[in-house]
Image (tube, helix red, strand yellow):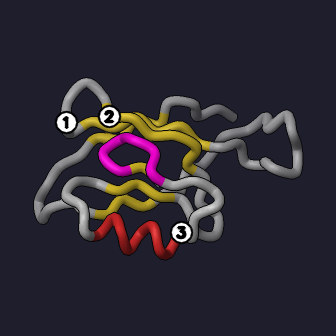
């Protein structure tokens, strides 16, 4: 889980508990801590409205080579009504 582009979740934490904590913070919270979520990393882009997303390979953890990255699934909380954001998935492949 990432809050304002910085990692705030670690695998020993409870994802639901971390999301509840994030609701009390100002800013955006990115998460893929749910079934089929595959965001690996997140960082702020060149402007406060741009975010770079890196995804995990489709077959991880079953295929350590992880050849394909053909889809993405993550959530963003804390978006204001009518707020426009741009997401760039940086490592898509087929």
Q: Earlier in the sequence, mark 3 or mark 1?
A: 3
| Residue topped by disc 3 | 15
- Residue 50 in magenta? no
| Mark closer to the observer (3, 2) | 3
Mark 3 vs mark 1, foreground winner is: 3
Q: Nearer the viewer, residue 57 or 16?
A: 16
* Nearer-N-terminus badge (3/2): 3
The answer to which quarter of the image holds residue 47 is top left
Q: Residue furthest front?
A: 12
Disc 2 vs disc 1: Cβ atoms closer than 8 Å?
Answer: yes
Q: Which residue carries the number 1 mark?
A: 48
Residue under label 2: 44
Q: Which residues are magenta?
A: 3-8
58 over 18 or under it: above or below: above
Residue displayed at 79% across by 34% down = 67
Residue 7 numbered mark, or none: none
Report x, y in % for residue 64.
86, 39
Residue beneath the point at 45% across and 67% down? 18
Can you give x and y, in whole percent of width and height, for residue 60 in the image? Answer: 78, 48
* Distance from Cα at disc 2 to Cα at disc 1: 7 Å
């Amino acid at each position: 889980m990432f809050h304002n582009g910085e990692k705030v979740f670690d695998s020993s934490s409870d994802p639901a508990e971390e999301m509840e904590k994030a609701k009390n913070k100002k800013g955006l919270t990115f998460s893929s801590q749910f079934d089929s979520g595959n965001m690996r990393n997140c960082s702020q882009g060149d402007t406060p409205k741009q975010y770079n997303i890196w995804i995990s390979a489709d077959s991880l953890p079953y295929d350590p080579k992880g050849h394909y990255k053909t889809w993405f699934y993550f959530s963003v909380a804390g978006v204001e009504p009518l707020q426009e954001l741009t997401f760039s998935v940086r490592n898509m492949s087929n």
